[in-house]
Image (cartoon, rainbow, N blue to C red):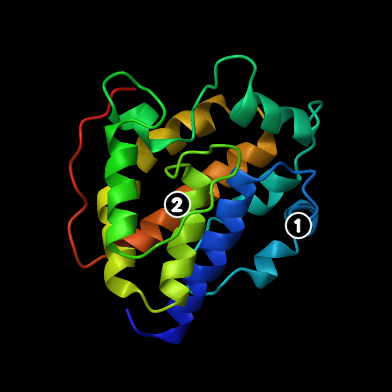
Amino acid sequence: MTQPRFVEAIAISGRVLGGLFFYAPQNENMAPLIDAFRDGSWAQEWPEAAPFDASLIETFQTASDEPLSEAYQRLFVGPYALPAPPWGSVWLDKESVLFGDSTLALRQWMRENNIAFEAQQNEPEDHFGTLLMLSAWLKENGREEAWQQLLAWHLLPWSGRFLQTFIENADHPFYRALGQLTQQTLAFWQSELLIPVAEKKLYR
């Protein structure tokens, strides 16, 4: 893919969606994004090349009794079991553990491609939000082959099941809409792949 509008669409959507999955809503960098999704202005700024269902505009704006910060805590932090853990190895490894074999394979691939990872609080490299943001970075920097491999080998094999489970268990309109928008965005990304998505056994 060489057209600038597609590069921009993937870079913007990857950074935005990845950040919303990775960072808590009270993070100062996330506040403007969350405001934009809540007031509907994001729809005008969203890349034209990245299609989405217009009904999501209203879903993002739907009120909830649960504060967004508490929903994030429940979905991504705990202390109770997370309904849809955002790490690839939980879905790809038989024991459903963090830092499993799939994480080690991703880590090795990153080394081979000279991709540095700055861990935050011992965070595994295969966090869903991290991989979306890494995808954006690779596309922005013209790393097309690495972008193709990251999606086909390390993200798309498990992201569909993760997002389906995340949406079903979000129990908050904002995060349900976020999951649905990400589903639609990854479908667009996958349509641009030139290599097949790896078939991997899922354990959840």
In the image, residue 144 above or below residue 99: below
Element assignment for label 1: loop
Amino acid bearing label 2: Leu
Q: Quadrant of the C terminus?
A: top left
Which residue is disc 2 drawn over? 131
Q: Which residue is mark 1?
A: 29
Q: Nearer the viewer, residue 96 or 84?
A: 96
Q: Is residue 73 above or below residue 126?
A: above
Give the quadrant of residue 170: top right
* Residue at (63, 21) in percent of width and height: 78
Mark 1 residue type: Asn
Q: Which mark is residue 41?
A: none
Q: Quadrant of the N terminus?
A: bottom left
CA gap, disc 2 and disc 1: 18 Å
Q: Residue at x 50, y 50 (%)?
A: 130
Q: Which residue does the image show at 28% across and 54% down from the upper left?
A: 109
Foreground residue among 24 and 61 = 24
Q: Residue 110: image x %, image y %?
A: 34, 56
Q: Earlier in the sequence, mark 2 or mark 1?
A: 1
Residue 196 in percent (x, y) is at: 17, 56
